[in-house]
Image (spheres, grey):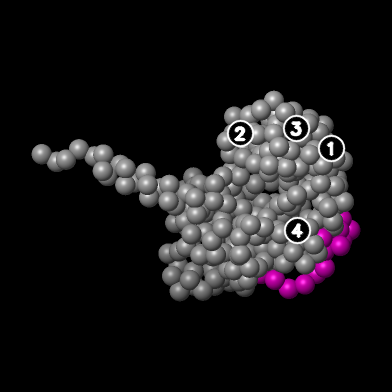
Amino acid sequence: MMMQAPPGIVPRFPIDKDCSINKRPTTIPRVLDNPEFCGLARQVSDQIRYYRLIVPLNLREPMYNTVKEKLARGEQVIGGTIDSPDPKVYRAMAKAGLDFLWIEMQHSPISYQEAATLILAGRDLPAIPFIRVPDATEGDIQKATDIGALGIIVPMVDEPEKVEAAVRFAKYPPQGKRSHGGGQYRDLWGNDYRNTANDNTMIIAQIESPTGVDNCEKIAAVPGVDVVFAAANDLASFSGHPQGTLAHEELVARISEATLKAGKQLGGPVEWLKRDHYLFFQMLSASTLIPRGVKDQLESIRSAPVPA
């Protein structure tokens, strides 16, 4: 049958094949069992994921990393930090309007198996999965990409060689040395993943120390780096200059200048949303946002007027 897009959704490529859910080789069981879950009922805001769910894998567009698309258009993107292995928490954050989810594996005990479960749990939601890896090792980056992460956040980049290694392990030949193994990436991003992954996988280099600042021009110039992230808290900790001081701002300015000179995107904490040229932001973690939300709700209830 001829596929029809929902009202308000304009297909960005022709649909001229049988798109019934029974024809798709990787249709998820809950869609087959409950067709009402399919993309036909989704809102316009979910149009990209609509096609990811309902269109045969060989018809998907080559660019499916919506974060990379938005940055290319000069739009700001915000990611929420996931420090819990609970898929319900992941889905709740993914439904909140965030552009991407920052799965925290440097400072949390989340395992790669748990991260894989989280990413698969959010496959029908718009937020793109990113992982902050513990280090830029081949094992860490290979696992992160194989389970479907489209963004690799590399912490503590003091030397360009570290992020060069990250690019090398995240990209397939000829751009890198990523090996072709198994993983759930095809279930998420399509059967043509091998040919589209390099264009969709992003590398974010975090500069967190004075040494990194001293090398920021070389770091920003590394081919394959998409975003240079000024890690404000650790930059203050390692430099001894508190945030807001002139000395701290001078370090941040050096990172900004080097990044823009290299033609890369600038990232930082979400508190910098109004700063010029910054487009990529990290928001608070789920474990921080949940108690804040509960506290706000309690205060609202307790301050409400007593019914007459």
Residue 214: assigned label? 1
Residue under numbered circle 2 = 272
Q: Which residue is mark 3?
A: 251
What x and y, as percent, mark residue 55?
59, 61
Of marks 4 and 2, which one's residue comes earlier in the chain?
4
Mark 4 to mark 2 CA distance (whole Å): 26 Å
Q: Is residue 67 visible?
A: yes
Q: Position of residue 152 (x, y in %)?
A: 72, 54
Magenta stretch: includes residue 170: yes
1 or 2: tag closer to the N-terminus: 1
Of the two numbered discs 1 and 4 on the same chain, state the one appearing first in sequence.
4
Q: Label 3, label 4: how many angstroms apart (C-alpha)?
A: 23 Å
| Image coords of residue 266 (percent x, y) | 71, 37
* Residue, disc 4: 135
User: In front here: 116 or 66?
Assistant: 116
- Taking the view exactly as shown, the residue that stands out farthest to the left is 308
**Which region is colored magenta?**
169-184
- Label 2 or label 3, whichever comes before in sequence order: 3
User: Which secondary structure type mostly characterizes the magenta part of the structure?
Assistant: loop
Image: 139 above or below 286: below
Identify the mark at residue 97; answer none if there is no mark: none
Q: Secondary structure at mark 3?
A: helix
Q: Amino acid at mark 2?
A: Trp
Numbered disc 4: secondary structure: loop
Residue 217 vs residue 22, the one in the foreground = 217
User: Image point 81% across, 33% down: which residue?
Assistant: 258
